[in-house]
């Protein structure tokens, strides 16, 4: 999950090579959560997913903004781009609405109504990262799903996917959604596994403190 949090290997190499400051170590972006609310998900697991996203958001940088979409029969924007603290509170208010799995509609709403719509609070010049949490393949106009993902990626947006379940139906579609199979695709056996992973991620200020010390040590070694 460190890639979604913004700690990228390419950025790490640039920092070491050009002696950039610690704040520049972390990729600057705003995030959109796309949350599966389809009938295959139990209510209890849905709210555990929401809890995991609250924890993840609470550990991120203060400067980042967040938006959220849920999808079942159709996609619904739950909140536009907002600051971290407000996003954590807004996540808590998202209801569970069971239905089909209309992933393509969520991707289209994300692109048109959040990323390309200035009224959504999208900040010009700030890249976007989408995190999709789903337990399986779409079943509403599924022939459009990967094309919608392609359109979204063409805006410069990176798509990360958390696939929940041991045996996922339609895994090829889920793989196709992600921007890559190494840094952008994660699998967990169940929602409890997702919660465990998120709880293991240190908060932003701890990561920054650790990297500051690591940076100082490297500087001292290079001057020795």
Image (tube, helix red, strand yellow):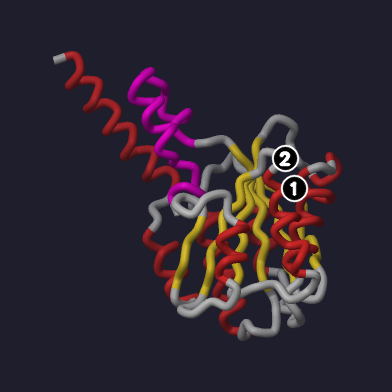
Q: Name the residue under label 2.
A: 155
Q: Position of residue 117 (x, y in %)?
A: 84, 43
Q: Where is residue 31 in the image (x, y as percent from the top left)?
A: 63, 48
**Is residue 40 positioned above or below 117 on the image?**
below
Q: Position of residue 29 (x, y in %)?
A: 60, 39
Query: How many C-alpha atoms fall within 10 Å of the one at disc 2: few (<14), some, or many (≥20)?
Result: few
Q: Which residue lies furthest to the top in this view?
A: 223
Q: Residue at the location (50% across, 77% down)?
A: 165
Q: Residue at the location (70% across, 61% down)?
A: 90
Inspect the magenta stretch and tell me whether residue 17 lies in it: yes
Q: Position of residue 175 (x, y in %)?
A: 56, 61
* Magenta region, residue range: 2-26
Q: How far apart are marks 1 and 2 (CA)?
A: 7 Å
Q: Is the magenta stretch mostly helix, strand or loop?
A: helix
Q: Do the residues labelled 1 and 2 touch (CB within 8 Å)?
A: yes
Inspect the magenta stretch and tell me whether residue 60 lies in it: no
Q: Residue at the location (40% across, 38% down)?
A: 9
**Is residue 195 positioned above or below 131 on the image?**
below
Judging from the image, what secondary structure is the residue with disc 1 in? helix
Query: How many C-alpha atoms fall within 10 Å of the one at disc 1: few (<14), some, or many (≥20)?
Result: some
Q: Report the front residue among 81 and 6.
A: 6
**Is residue 19 positioned above or below 41 on the image?**
above
Q: Report the front residue among 84 and 184.
A: 184
Quarter the N terminus occupies = bottom left
Judging from the image, what secondary structure is the residue with disc 2 in? loop
Q: Name the residue under label 1.
A: 151
Res 113 label = none
Q: Report the front residue among 118 and 105.
A: 105
């Amino acid at each position: 999950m460190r890639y979604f949090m913004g700690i990228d290997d390419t950025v790490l190499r640039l920092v070491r090579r050009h002696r950039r400051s610690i704040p520049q170590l972390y990729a600057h972006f705003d995030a959109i959560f796309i949350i599966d609310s389809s009938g295959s998900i139990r209510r209890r697991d849905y709210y555990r997913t929401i809890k995991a996203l609250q924890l993840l958001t609470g550990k991120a940088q203060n400067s980042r903004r967040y938006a959220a979409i849920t999808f079942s029969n159709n996609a619904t924007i739950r909140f536009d781009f907002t600051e971290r603290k407000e996003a954590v509170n807004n996540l808590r208010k998202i209801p569970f609405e069971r239905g089909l799995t209309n992933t393509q509609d969520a991707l289209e709403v994300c692109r048109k109504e959040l990323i390309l719509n200035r009224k959504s609070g999208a900040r010009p010049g700030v890249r976007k990262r989408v995190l999709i949490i789903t337990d399986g393949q779409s079943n509403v106009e599924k022939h459009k799903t990967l094309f919608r993902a392609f359109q979204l990626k063409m805006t410069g947006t990176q798509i990360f996917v958390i696939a929940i379940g041991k045996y996922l139906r339609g895994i090829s579609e889920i793989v196709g959604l992600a921007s890559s199979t190494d840094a952008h695709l994660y699998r967990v056996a169940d929602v409890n596994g997702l919660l465990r992973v998120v709880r293991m991620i240190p908060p932003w200020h701890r990561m920054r403190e650790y990297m500051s010390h690591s940076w100082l040590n490297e500087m001292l070694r290079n001057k020795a």
